[in-house]
Image (tube, helix red, strand yellow):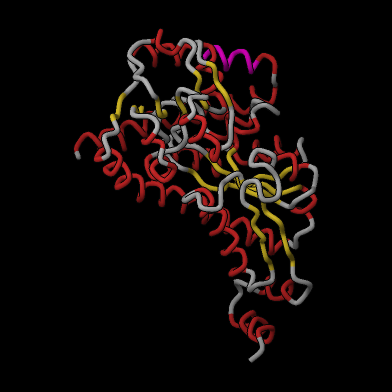
C-alpha cells in the first residue's frame, strides 16, 4: 500500500488525524530551525533534535525541520534576530538571552528566588504566562512556544570560594538575565556569552566564575576541570527554553500543523525536565568523586541578592511597562502558589 493511501485510510478509522491527512496531500513543508547549542550538547540540543523528530513523525513526514546548531547558520545568540527578520523559520534557545532587547523576556525565563518548574508550567498554561509571552513576542515578529525546562539550576562554578559579600567585588562572571542585573549591583562584572564559549573563558581566566545549568550538562562540558567550587541554586529555579517561530512562518502553517507543533513542543518541554532530573543525580555523584566541592552562598550574599532583586524589579517596572505587566502576573501567581508548594512538596521532602 502506498504511503498516501495508508494515511487517507487511517484518517477514516480515527477522528484524531483527518486534518493531518488532508494537509499531508499537499506540498511538503520544510522549516529551518537554528539553535543556540553545540551539536553535541545533551539535554538542550537533544531536545531540539527530539522536537524535530516528533513533528516529522506526527505529520507523517509531511513536515520536515532542518536543524542548524550553534554557529552553523547564525551565531548562537543571533537566532532571535534571524527569526525576527524572517531569515529562518524558528529557533531553540533560552528566553533570558533577549533581556537586552526587552527586560520582560527575563520574567518568562524564570526569576531568582522565583517559581520552580511545576509552578512555572502552571503559570504558563493556566496563569496567563504563555499569553503574555506571546503578546511580548508579537512586538518582535516572533511567536514563542514552550521548549523545555531544566528545573533548578546550580548557582555556578567559581575558581575561588565566596565566603562573604565582599568577595564578589570585582569578580568577572558569566551570567544572564535578572541574575546578572542583581550581581552587577553587588559589584560583580557580569558578561554574557554563549554556552560553547564558557569553558575556554574559564580556563584562560577571562572570567573568574560562570553559571551554566546543572550537574549533567556541567559535567558534559567539563567545568570541574577548570573551577573547583560549585554553588547551589538561587538565580534560576526553573529556566525556560523556547521554540520560537517567525510570525509569518507560523501563520503560514495549516491549523492542523500548528496543532502538531504545539503538541510536540509540550512533549519536548516535559521531556527536558524529566531528562534533567534523571541525569543530574548520577552526574552529581560523579562530580563529587572527582573532587568538586559543593558550597552554598553565605547568608549575607543571599540577603544582598534578595534586596537587589527588589531594586531591579522596581527600576525595570518604572521604565518598562512590558516588564511591569509580566512581573505583576508572575509574582502574583507565585504568591498564590508558594504556600501550597511549601506545605505539599516542602513538608514531604522533610520526611524522606
Give the residue at x 57% y 24%.
Answer: 191
Residue that protrudes farthest toward the left in the picture:
351
Residue at x 60% of width, y 37% of height: 95
Total number of numbered discs in the rendering: 0
Residue 312 falls inside the magenta stretch: yes
Q: Quadrant of residue 29?
A: bottom right
Q: Residue at x 73, y 52 (%)?
A: 89
Left or right: 319 as drawn, with respect to 205: right
Q: Main secondary structure of the magenta part?
A: helix
Name the spot of residue 165 as percent of width and height, x first. Answer: 39, 10
Q: Position of residue 154 (x, y in %)?
A: 40, 32
- The residue nearer to you, when weighing 248 against 76, is 76
The answer to whether 36 is drawn above or below residue 30 in the figure is above
Query: Which quarter shows the C terminus?
Result: top left
* Horizontal relation, residue 103 to residue 181: left or right: right
Residue at position x 31%, y 45% in the image: 281
**Left or right, residue 348 beside residue 72:** left
Residue sitting farthest toward the top: 166
Asked whether 295 falls inside the magenta stretch, the response is: no
**The magenta segment:** 309-317
Amino acid at each position: 500500500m502506498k504511503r498516501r493511501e495508508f494515511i487517507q485510510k487511517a484518517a477514516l478509522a480515527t477522528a484524531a488525524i483527518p486534518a493531518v491527512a488532508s494537509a499531508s496531500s499537499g506540498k511538503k513543508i520544510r522549516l529551518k530551525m537554528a539553535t543556540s547549542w553545540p551539536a553535541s550538547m545533551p539535554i538542550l540540543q537533544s531536545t531540539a533534535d527530539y522536537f524535530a523528530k516528533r513533528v516529522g513523525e506526527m505529520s507523517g513526514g509531511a513536515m520536515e525541520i532542518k536543524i542548524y546548531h550553534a554557529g552553523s547558520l547564525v551565531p548562537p545568540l543571533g537566532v532571535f534576530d534571524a527569526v525576527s527578520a524572517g531569515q529562518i523559520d524558528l529557533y531553540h534557545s533560552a528566553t533570558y538571552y533577549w533581556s537586552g532587547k526587552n527586560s520582560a523576556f527575563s520574567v518568562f525565563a524564570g526569576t531568582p528566588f522565583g517559581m520552580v518548574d511545576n509552578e512555572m508550567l502552571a503559570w504558563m498554561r493556566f496563569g496567563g504566562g504563555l499569553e503574555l509571552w506571546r503578546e511580548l513576542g508579537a512586538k518582535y515578529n516572533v511567536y514563542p512556544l514552550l521548549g523545555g525546562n531544566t528545573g533548578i539550576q546550580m548557582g555556578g562554578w567559581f575558581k575561588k570560594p565566596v565566603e562573604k559579600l565582599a568577595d564578589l567585588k570585582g569578580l568577572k562572571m558569566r551570567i544572564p538575565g535578572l541574575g546578572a542585573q542583581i550581581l552587577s549591583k553587588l559589584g560583580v562584572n557580569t558578561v554574557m556569552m554563549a554556552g560553547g564559549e564558557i569553558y575556554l573563558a574559564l580556563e584562560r581566566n577571562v572570567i573568574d566564575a560562570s553559571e551554566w545549568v546543572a550537574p549533567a550538562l556541567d559535567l558534559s562540558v567539563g567545568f570541574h576541570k577548570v573551577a573547583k567550587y560549585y554553588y547551589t541554586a538561587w538565580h534560576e529555579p526553573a529556566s525556560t527554553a523556547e521554540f520560537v517561530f517567525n510570525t509569518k512562518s507560523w501563520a503560514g502553517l495549516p491549523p492542523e500543523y500548528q496543532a502538531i507543533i504545539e503538541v510536540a513542543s509540550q512533549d519536548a518541554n516535559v521531556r527536558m525536565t524529566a531528562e534533567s532530573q534523571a541525569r543530574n543525580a548520577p552526574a552529581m555523584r560523579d562530580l563529587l568523586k572527582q573532587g568538586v566541592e559543593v558550597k552554598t552562598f553565605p547568608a549575607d550574599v543571599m540577603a544582598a541578592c534578595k534586596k537587589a532583586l527588589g531594586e531591579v524589579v522596581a527600576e525595570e517596572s518604572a521604565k518598562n511597562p512590558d516588564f511591569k505587566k509580566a512581573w505583576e502576573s508572575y509574582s502574583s501567581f507565585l504568591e498564590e502558589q508558594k504556600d501550597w508548594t511549601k506545605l505539599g512538596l516542602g513538608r514531604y521532602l522533610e520526611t524522606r
